[in-house]
Amino acid sequence: MNTDKAAPRHFLDLKDHSPATLRQMLDDASQMKRDWKAGIRAPQRAMFEGLVLAMIFQKPSTRTRISFEVAIRDLGGAAIVLHAQELQLGRGETIADTARILSGYVDAVMIRSSDHEDVVDLAHHASIPVINGLTDVSHPCQLMADILTYEEVRGPVSGTKIAWIGDGNNVAHSWIQAAALFDFELTLAVPEGFDPDPDQIEWAKAEGASIHIHRDPIAAIENAECVVTDTWISMGDDKAVTRRAALAPYQVTTDMMAAAKPDAIFMHCLPAHRGEEVTADVIDGPASVVFLEAENRLHAQKAILRWCLVGGSTSS
Ligand code: CP
Ligand code: NVA
């Protein structure tokens, strides 16, 4: 159990952190990835030995669950996976009480929740770090892996143009926050009725971000270095038929990619639905970096865990 009485280091949203802190986490992730590829497994295991990460899932997960579990194990700790419906939380025990109970047993909590406010509430009442593993509002861990991936493939993201095509959803919100914090232009093409939360855009613009909303995907994609999309039907969304009809003109196709820069890359947080938000020839084609993006979740999670648990890189 963590007996450190200092305020816990939560990772709830990118916008809670300075560009310098996020950059330090990305540098740490890159270094750990190089070590991992060289067969060096977390040299500072002693520091994490005995640390336990609880992971609460109110929604399904492949990448987030596996990458966090492997990440904490490689650092030298352990994970407990908790499905919300199997906890008393599912029978009405409060978030506040759950936070106090978890704080007495484990060293950090990662939570995937339907309601962002539940995660904020959990962090408010916990004396251990809380990590947002996706909510209806945002997906900050995904964006750390996405920026890591972009920079691994294309170099610094600062000053580039990235186009988001499709639904103005939770992942789009984290891209909007990232645009402000990592200093790139973000153009979004979304149909009417699917705009991102205006508060997210207002926050990013107040931070100096260059963000533009278009209805025409080609206008958004022109000269972009990277085209990003996500599922049209996020976990918990209803009205699938209506959504599919409204979003159909926003399917990322080879013709659409041709409007971007010639060497533009394609990104998607996955899971993908070939034939809906993206055609198979794009996601399985040479511009796609989606599997590198998924792989990089592991290295990004390790950096986030290190920052939350021991204050960041232990190698310097
Ligand atoms: N991208 C992502 O978070 O995937 P999972 O839902 O599989 O965790
Ligand atoms: N927008 C998607 C992302 C899945 C990782 C969802 O919330 O289901």
Image (spheres, rainbow, N blue to C red):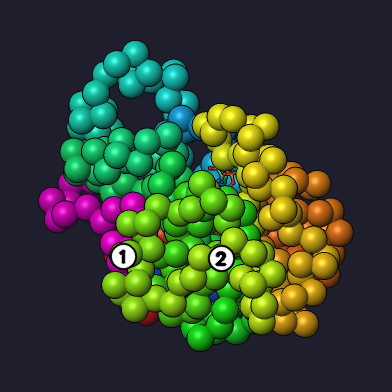
Q: Earlier in the sequence, mark 2 or mark 1?
A: 1
Tag 2: amino acid: His
Residue marked by disc 1: 203
Instruction: Report which residue position mark 2 lands on.
Output: 214
Label the magenta part by its dominant secondary structure. loop
Question: Callout 2: 10 Å neighbours few (<14), some, many (20+)?
Answer: some
Could you tell me which residue is drawn at 77 percent across and 82 percent down? 262
**Quick one: SS at disc 2?**
strand
Residue at image position (43%, 42%) is: 135
Q: Is residue 222 above or below residue 297?
A: below
- Residue 97 located left or right of residue 247: left
Looking at the picture, tell me which residue is in the foreground, 308 or 230.
230
Q: Is residue 262 visible?
A: yes
Task: State the image coordinates of residue 121 (x, y, percent, origin top left).
Answer: 24, 38
Quadrant containing the C terminus is bottom left
User: Residue 118's image quarter?
Assistant: top left
User: What mark, if any, has residue 185 been given in the picture?
Assistant: none
Toward the viewer: 270 or 43?
A: 270
Q: Residue at x 47, y 49 (%)?
A: 170
- The quarter of the rendering in which ligand 1 is drawn is top right
Can you give x and y, in whole percent of width and height, for residue 285 in the image? 84, 64
Occupied quadrant, residue 306: bottom left
Q: Let me know if residue 65 is in the magenta part.
A: no
Q: Residues within 10 Å of mark 1 (few under 14, many from 20)?
A: some
Q: Is residue 103 above or below residue 158?
A: above
Magenta segment: 1-18
Instruction: Tell whether 203 sits left or right of 7.
Output: right
Element on which disc 1 rests? helix
